[in-house]
Amino acid sequence: MANKSQKVKMVNKETMVVGLDIGKGSHYGYFRAPDGQDSIPFEFHNHRDSFNQFWQKLCRFKSNHGLKEVLIGFESTGPYAEPILHFLRQQPVKLVQINPMHTKRVKELTGNSPNKTDRKDPRVIVDVMMLGHSLTVVVPEGASAHLRRLTQARERAVTDRTAMLNQLQHLLFIIFPEFLRVIKTVSSKTGLYLAGHYPTPDAIAALGLAELSRVIKAVSCGRIGADRADRLFQAARNSVGIVEGRDSIVTEIGYLVAQIEHANAFIVQLEGKMQQHLERIPYSGSLLSMRGIGVITAAGLIGEVGDFRKFSTISEITKLAGLDLFEVSSGKLKGQRHISKRGRSLMRKLLYFAAINTVRSNGVMQYSYARMLERGMPKMKALVAISRKLLAVMFALVRDQTAYIENYDHNCLQLAA
């Protein structure tokens, strides 16, 4: 209840409320004064001259109505909002973000119609802001901004690499299906090397068992023994892979292997840069003090959050991640509680995989996870609950400038070094 009251207080008798409907080439703006007087929704474009004209128009409206503060709201619109937000951040205004689900519902109240237009949308955004349903925008700056870009770039690179690995396995299955039964992980160093240099059964058989054993031992640094080499050699001699069109498939396999190796190198490069920028975050040591929270998780969360220190309550940051709980109950029907998922999906993904790491044997959340399972909670829900718990602990560590101490008893926190 305290959070809702705080949001409503952002709009007072001296506040000019501005709604922005963000587009790729142009935006629509709308002004409203506390007494209800407003402007006609107007269009402006995505370049500096038009931004300056928008700002001059805003200042005139503010002056004419004797207002002192400016509150500007917009929907989550991905990259299209970034230029105008960068411009507005340099002005004396407060920026808030509106959940598109809220505007969708309020939109139908306006004129009792689901009609959607660029001129209607900024009005609806202001209506939502007047109701107090807006969230403070925390724009990453400095090292945090770099971490957001690097995390998003890594996520795209990993997604592309996964797609290429799936295609590589598909092609290998056509010409050498037994390969995947012996070398189970084609993404491994050995798997990629063999797929790139000896993708066909004939190529493997032509090496001979002794040479194949030597190659596999060298590439795998001794982790794959002669028995696996022998299985692969025998599989190659008795393969049921197709021969028609095989050379063309081999050409594509070579391309995919090269692209995957390039993606691997790029991901390593990104992770190195993430490590460098993470070291510039004052409270990164607090997050990394938890066993199971690594560089990728910490860097990704800081990039998505922007700055943990700019959130005053755990509920705010939980909503940002879409991990806040809701239930649908009516009369005697008691609904189950679920997470809203109305937040940053990458944050939820990072926290979920972090939860998996921390509930493993001797993990810092293993005991909590085991107790949840004992109470009959499904594994998936238990992991989501651990994700929420991890986020709460991280928020507390940053807030108190502390490091995590395992085996919590009475005082599990100490000043971070």
Image (cartoon, helix red, strand yellow):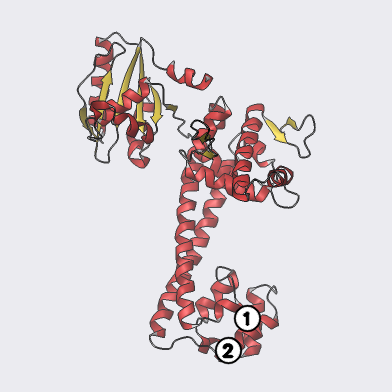
Q: Which residue is drawn at 78% across and 29% down?
A: 411
Percent position of residue 191, x then y:
57, 73
Q: Which residue is drawn at 44% across and 15% down?
A: 9
Percent position of residue 385, x then y:
61, 41
Q: In this view, does 327 lie to the left or right of 294?
A: left
In the image, is residue 102 above or below residue 201? above
* Element on which disc 2 rests: helix
Mark 2 lies on residue: 207
Three-letter code for the amino acid on which mark 2 is drawn: Leu
Q: Which residue is drawn at 55% across and 75% down?
A: 193
| Camera sees residue 275 | no
| Separation of marks 2 and 1 at Cα, in angstroms | 9 Å
Using the image as rendered, state which of residue 64 and residue 118 is in the foreground: 118
Tell me whether the residue at label 2 lies in contact with that at label 1, contact meaning CB atoms closer than 8 angstroms: yes
Mark 1 lies on residue: 215
Percent position of residue 159, x then y:
46, 57
Percent position of residue 182, x then y:
61, 78
* Element on which disc 1 rests: helix
